Image: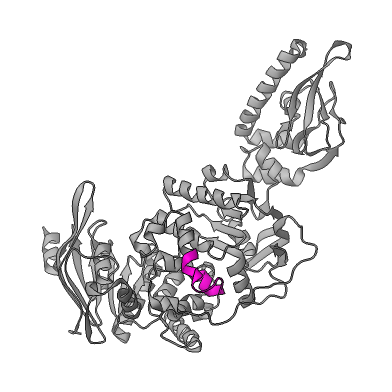
Amino acid sequence: MSSSTRQRTPRTKPKADLQRVHDASPEAIIELRGVVKKFSNAAGEFTVLKGVDLEINRGEFVSIVGKSGSGKSTLLNMITGIDHPSDGRVIVNHNDIYTGVSESQRSKWRGKNLGIVFQFFQLLPMLTLLENVMLPMDYVDMYNFDLRPVRALELLEMVGLEKFANKLPVLVSTGQQQLAAIARAMACDPPLLIADEPTGNLDTRSADAVIRIFEQFVQQGKTIVMVTHDPSLTSRTDRNIILSDGELINETISRSLPQLRHRHMLEFTKLAERHTFQPHETIISHDDSVNHFFMIKEGQVEVVLQKKRSQETIVSQLGKNEFFGEIELLRGGTSIANVRAGTKPVEVLMIPRDDFKRVMDESPVTVEAIGKTVQKRLDEHRMADPRSLKR
Amino acid sequence: MNTPIVELKNVSKTYSTAAGDFPALRNINLTVHLGEFLGIVGKSGAGKSTLLNMINGVDELTEGEVIVSSGGKPVSVHNLTEDEKAQWRGKTMGVVYQSFQLLPMLTLVENITLVMDLAENFKPRESREKALELLRLVEIEEHADKLPSFISGGQQQRVAIARALANDPDILVADEPTGSLDSITADHVFELFSRLAAERGKTIIMVTHDMGLKSRFTRHCTLVDGELMSESHTHRKGKQ
């Protein structure tokens, strides 16, 4: 390491303390409340985020997906304090990061609270990997001066790069450069790591190494929010948030009907009626006509067949992100079973029959996937009560 | 124009791999003069980046010598220790790569002052002034306090060039600096390089795989399988 790097002192002492928000959700590390972002250009005004409400809890590993232009990067820019919302509030780590905060205050706050990783690795080409990892510590003046290289080396060890600590970025592979950039993002031990397409420029093996390291961070209690296009990564996160045309898709809908097009998911998000059923309350009665498609947001339901002499059989129990009511809506006829809430209250989202049928007409892939579920349920019913299909 | 600033004498670089020795550069002799905008053109794998790494001392050579005479003081680059090399490089050479490597959490002007602070060439108050002057030179001054993600790729590359100039080095080395830019934006970067050479006397050494760019340099040479072809040599080959 060059002595010039060691002797550098920051120009100003950091003032990273922002005002705490007293009504912030205690578990949330990120809260967006009615966030709107408008851009103006020659063609007029364009709304990129249309009133986004979002809570991300401490320790969650969250992926954000959406088509190009859906507002993903703008959403990340709101969370990182890089861009200003036109309306609404952004609360990160219980601080309102936009109200009464100067750019330089925000910059210091960002240095202590956020790690940021981008698709391209942004290592300074003239500094070794170790020096690159030490940069943020210098910038926000964290850790004792002599401790910085020790901590930087520990971080490089964590990502398996200790052997290359004194090499310049150009002499290691692109996968290794990205791992070094991740080590640098964690330099000041931030509670939150934000990653924008972190594996977009990597081969599968390197991408896997990056995600494994992210999983380690999550196990240590860090929160990770990652924008990605790669479905093999979204399957490894706790939550998958989908943005469509500047609006968030309800996560129950995207988990229940993953084959649906984003625009249809968004339509269902807007149409969905919420309802909570109390323990054991009937949701659908046998022989009733079914007027809604149901998706379970929280809790469990029981699908029950009534046999002779009031004997009943529970043919299935459905939980979070599962659906019911589809058999009757797609095949016609009245309900072939009773559906009731389980032992705890059940929160469901309900889509009206006509809207559900119209969207299904436009989405044959979803109908096919639902068809398989229908078949499975009918088989379950047949085993439980051979009479049910003879009707 | 005829003062030599970079001299490569019989430079060879061989990489040892499991499959045997691989010669990446074979006996390169090259003199670059003060104020030249030199292009080194060649296909992928021809040894272009390795050649740049020999000039800026990033990678070790197998044989030969590289002498850089910045400020009239000749230095045999590969005889320096790693620490000496890092200090020497910081003062003598600016580097620009295909990806811009700006730090996402710092504003454009901070990206430049950071490099100045690392080399301790200027007092803190001076460094901002100097950084703004460089941003003016690359015509990005109005965006000085923005973060990199708010400007276009071409603008980011111009900031990266301004950063490479932060410590007023005599030499700029650029590895495919226009590789990820569209042709109009790439044109602007070329104009900037030409201006830096003609008006500020900077020596610019740029490698590219794009043969179509040859005419944009004050001089170019071609690298084929680790060997340097003279200009006339490539020309003759081209006519066959």
**Quadrant of the rendered structure where residue A193 is?**
bottom right
User: What is the chief secondary structure element of the magenta stretch?
Assistant: helix
Task: Identify the residue at image location x=12%, y=68%.
Answer: B232
In the picture provided, is B32 more to the left or to the right than A29?
left
Can the viewer see residue B149 in this picture? yes
Q: Is residue A308 above or below residue A209?
A: above
Q: Is residue B114 above or below residue A181?
A: below
Can the viewer see residue B101 in this picture? no
Q: Quadrant of the N terminus of chain A?
A: bottom left
Task: Identify the residue at image location x=77%, y=14%.
Answer: A388
**Quadrant of the rendered structure where residue B36 is?**
bottom left
Q: Is residue A137 magenta?
A: yes
In the picture provided, is A363 more to the left or to the right than A352?
left
Q: Is residue A86 above or below residue A239?
A: below
In the picture provided, is A56 more to the left or to the right than B150?
right
In the picture provided, is B61 more to the left or to the right than A173?
left
Task: Identify the residue at image location x=41%, y=54%.
Answer: A175
Q: Nearer the viewer, residue A126 or A355?
A: A126
Q: Is residue B123 magenta?
A: no
Residue B44 at x, y percent in the picture: 27, 56
Residue A249 at x, y percent in the picture: 68, 48
Q: Nearer the viewer, residue B46 or A7?
A: A7
Q: Nearer the viewer, residue A8 or A214?
A: A8
Q: Nearer the viewer, residue A154 or A225?
A: A154
Residue A319 at x, y percent in the picture: 73, 33
- Which coloring applies here? one colour
Read off the magenta span.
Answer: A135-151
Q: Quadrant of the C terminus of chain A?
A: top right
